[in-house]
Amino acid sequence: MQLIFMGPPGAGKGTQAQLLAALWKIPHISTGDILRACVVAKTPLGLKAQAYMDAGDLVPDQLLMDIVQERMNQPDATSGWILDGFPRTVPQAAFFDKLICDVSGGAGSTSGKDCDLRAVNLDVPDDILVSRLLSRGRQDDNEETIRRRLQVYREQTEPLIEFYRNREQLVAVDGNRAMELVTAELQQALSGDS
C-alpha cells in the first residue's frame, strides 16, 4: 500500500497516518518530522529549512526531494508506506511519480505503475484549522503564521487535489469529525480500493 496524505496544516494528516501505518505495519514517513529533526540537530539542511519554516513558507522543492528520495530508498519502505507532507506542489508530484517508477520499477519489474499509489485528502474548514494549530502550542504556530501557511497551502498545494483526481487516485475524506470516525472512513475507503 502506497499512500500520500494531503490536506492543510492541522487537518490531522499526521495523526491519521500514524494510526493507519501502525495498523497496516508500514512506515509513516513525515517530511515535517524529518525537517524538524534536521532543525533541532542544526544540520546544514535543517538550517536552510528553518528560515523558510519560520516565515511560514514551504521548504524549496529540491531540498524536500533530496530528503524524500533518501528516505524512500530505505529497506522498511519496500512493502509500502504512508507519506505525509510530500508532495506539496504539482512539480513535486511529477518528480514523485518518476521516483515511484524508479523505486517500484526495480529488478524484475517492467513498470512502477503497478504501485497502487493513492492520495488521501483530509478536508477541514480554515477556522477549525487555526483553532487546532493554536492549541498545539508550537513555537512556530501563532495566528499570523498559521494564516500565512494556510494561504501558501491554498495557492501551492490545493492544485494537487485536481492532479490526483484527474489520475483517479484521489480519496477525499471529511477531516472535521471525531478522530475515530475519520480513521474508520479511511480504513473502509482504502481497504475497499485494494
Image (cartoon, rainbow, N blue to C red):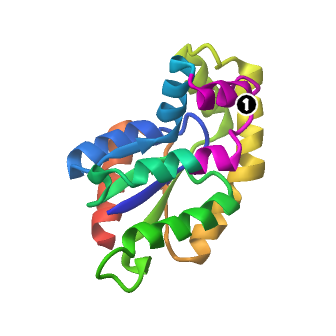
Residue denoted by label 1 = 52
- Image position of 188 with respect to 105: above or below: above
Name the residue at 77% across, 22% down.
Answer: 144
Considering depth in this image, is 117 or 185 the residue closer to the camera? 117
* Amino acid marked by disc 1: Tyr
Left or right of 110? Residue 158 is: right
Q: Main secondary structure of the magenta part?
A: helix
Left or right of 33? Residue 107 is: left
Q: Of helix, strand and loop, which one carries label 1?
A: helix
47 magenta-colored: yes
Q: Quadrant of the C terminus?
A: bottom left
* Picture coordinates of residue 45, whole percent (x, y): 61, 32
Considering depth in this image, is 175 or 34 the residue closer to the camera? 34
| Res 46 visible | yes
Considering depth in this image, is 74 or 1 the residue closer to the camera? 74
* Picture coordinates of residue 182, whole percent (x, y): 39, 46
| Res 7 visible | no
Name the residue at 51% across, 40% down.
Answer: 31
- Image position of 80 with respect to 166: above or below: above
State the image quarter where residue 9 is shown: top right
28 magenta-colored: no
- Image position of 101 with respect to 136: above or below: below
Name the residue at 67% across, 37% down.
Answer: 126
Q: Which residues are magenta?
A: 43-65
View extreme (bottom): residue:
110
Numbered circles on residues, count: 1
Q: Quadrant of the N terminus?
A: bottom left
* Picture coordinates of residue 27, whole percent (x, y): 31, 46
